Amino acid sequence: MNQDQSITTFFMFNGKAEEAMSFYTSIFDDSEIDNVIHHEDGTVLHATFTLKGQTYMAIDNINRNDHPFSPAMSLFVACDSEEEIERVYDKLSLFGTVLMPLEESSFSEKFAWVEDRFGVSWQLNLPKSDE
């Protein structure tokens, strides 16, 4: 078995890959754009970036076909503090859509579901503390 095998989330943006990666890496700790290869026209041919230690890949859709993201697939973020979940919620929901507002839930201290300005869905969770 090849030890280098992995499964990685791969995003296809409609001309906004570099902007999205810069936005995401500005929000989360332990995050950076690792590598970007451009087409001659400046769009992203292939890129890797890291959010909270997890690696993702991204490209720009060169066919210009509209392939929107869907809430049926979302990124689930386990937050460490109330400050973190509020900060991340505020940034991701700005110019986006709130699918579920940030509030207490039956399963967590706080939870929210947002679609950011690029169309990517995020579930934000602050687990209940052990009492």
Image (cartoon, rainbow, N blue to C red):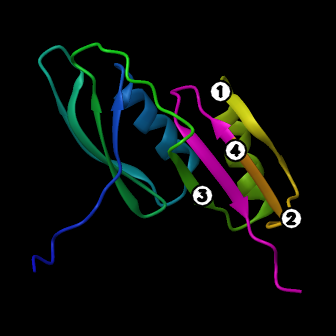
Q: Which of marks 4 and 2 is in front?
A: 2
* Residue located at (24% from left, 66% from top): 6
Query: Residue 20 appears at what percent x and percent y?
Result: 44, 32
Eyeballing the image, is 101 above or below 64? Answer: below
Amino acid identity at mark 3: Val
Q: What stretch is highlighted in magenta?
A: 114-131
Q: Which of marks 1 and 2 is in front?
A: 2
**Alpha carbon distance from label 1 to label 2:** 25 Å
* Residue located at (74% from left, 48% from top): 112
Mark closest to the chain's N terminus, 4 or 2: 2
Q: What element carries label 1?
A: loop
* Residue sticking out furthest to the bottom: 131
Query: Residue 109 appears at what percent x and percent y?
Result: 84, 65
Eyeballing the image, is 9 above or below 96? Answer: below
Label 4–label 2 contact, CB within 8 A:
no
Most foreground residue, 106 or 89 = 106
Q: Is mark 2 on a helix, strand or loop?
A: loop
Quadrant where the image shows the C terminus = bottom right
Amino acid identity at mark 1: Gly
Amino acid identity at mark 4: Trp
Residue position for label 3: 77
Amino acid identity at mark 2: Ser
Residue position for label 1: 96
Dot 4: within a 10 Å radius of its alpha carbon, few (fewer than 14), some, or many (20 or more) residues? many
